[in-house]
Image (tube, rainbow, N blue to C red):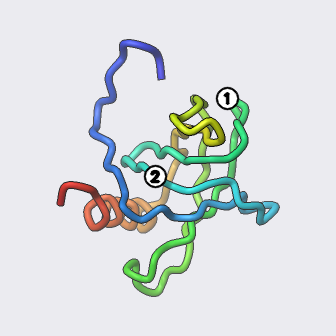
């Protein structure tokens, strides 16, 4: 995201730190700490390149019902060192998502937000 440009929709902070994997390799990429209808923030141990496309698999909590995971296409748009020297925050813009998956994301934003 460009400096000085504000986000159009408020991002919700999740109290569940959901595991996120590379769906092609199965490798743990990081943990979901922030989610909006169009993007997400992962906390990772190693920085990721900006502008790369990923196919991410989010491991869903039991509170999401019968679904155990959600696979989304996403592009990394920023990577910055967090307060802790060994953690990086990587922002992703989500690609096109089907109606059912979008409804699941909206449900997660509502159910798991801070300040509820």
Among the 4 quarters of the image, the one containing residue 9: top left
104, above or below 93, in the image:
below
Query: Separation of disc 2 and disc 1 at Cα?
Result: 18 Å
Count the numbered circles shown.
Answer: 2
Looking at the picture, tell me which residue is in the foreground, 42 or 110.
42
Image location (x, y in percent) of residue 81: 59, 31
Q: Residue at x 56, y 73 (%)?
A: 69
Q: Give the side of residue 6 with respect to residue 1, left or right.
A: left
Which image quarter holds the C terminus?
A: bottom left
Image location (x, y in percent) of residue 45: 68, 46
114, above or below 52, in the image:
below
Looking at the picture, tell me which residue is in the foreground, 88 or 29.
88
Q: Give the side of residue 44 with respect to residue 93, left or right.
A: right
Among the 4 quarters of the image, the one containing residue 57: bottom right
**Residue at numbered disc 2:** 33
Image location (x, y in percent) of residue 63: 37, 80
Q: Secondary structure at mark 1?
A: loop
Q: Residue at x 65, y 41 (%)?
A: 86
Q: Give the side of residue 28 with respect to residue 112, left or right.
A: right
**Crowding at mark 2 (Cα within 10 Å: few <14, some 14-19, many 20+):** some
Q: Residue at x 47, y 16 (%)?
A: 2
Which label is found at residue 71? Answer: none
**Residue at numbered disc 1:** 50
- Looking at the image, which residue sits at the far left? 116
**Crowding at mark 1 (Cα within 10 Å: few <14, some 14-19, many 20+):** some
Q: Residue at x 44, y 83 (%)?
A: 62
43, above or below 82, in the image:
below
4, above or below 100, in the image:
above
Q: Secondary structure at mark 2?
A: strand
Identify the mark nearer the N-term, 2 or 1.
Answer: 2
- Looking at the image, which residue sits at the far right? 25
């Amino acid at each position: 995201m460009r400096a000085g440009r504000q986000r159009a929709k408020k991002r919700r902070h999740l109290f569940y730190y959901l595991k996120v994997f590379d769906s092609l390799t199965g490798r743990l990429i990081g943990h979901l700490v922030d989610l909006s209808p169009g993007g997400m923030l992962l906390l990772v141990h190693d920085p990721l390149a900006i502008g790369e496309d990923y196919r991410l698999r989010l491991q869903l909590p039991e509170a999401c019902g019968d679904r155990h995971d959600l696979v989304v296409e996403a592009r990394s748009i920023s990577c910055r060192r967090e307060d802790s020297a060994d953690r990086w925050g990587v922002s992703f813009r989500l690609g096109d998502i089907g109606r059912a998956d979008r409804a699941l994301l909206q449900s997660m934003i509502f159910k798991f937000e801070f300040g509820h």
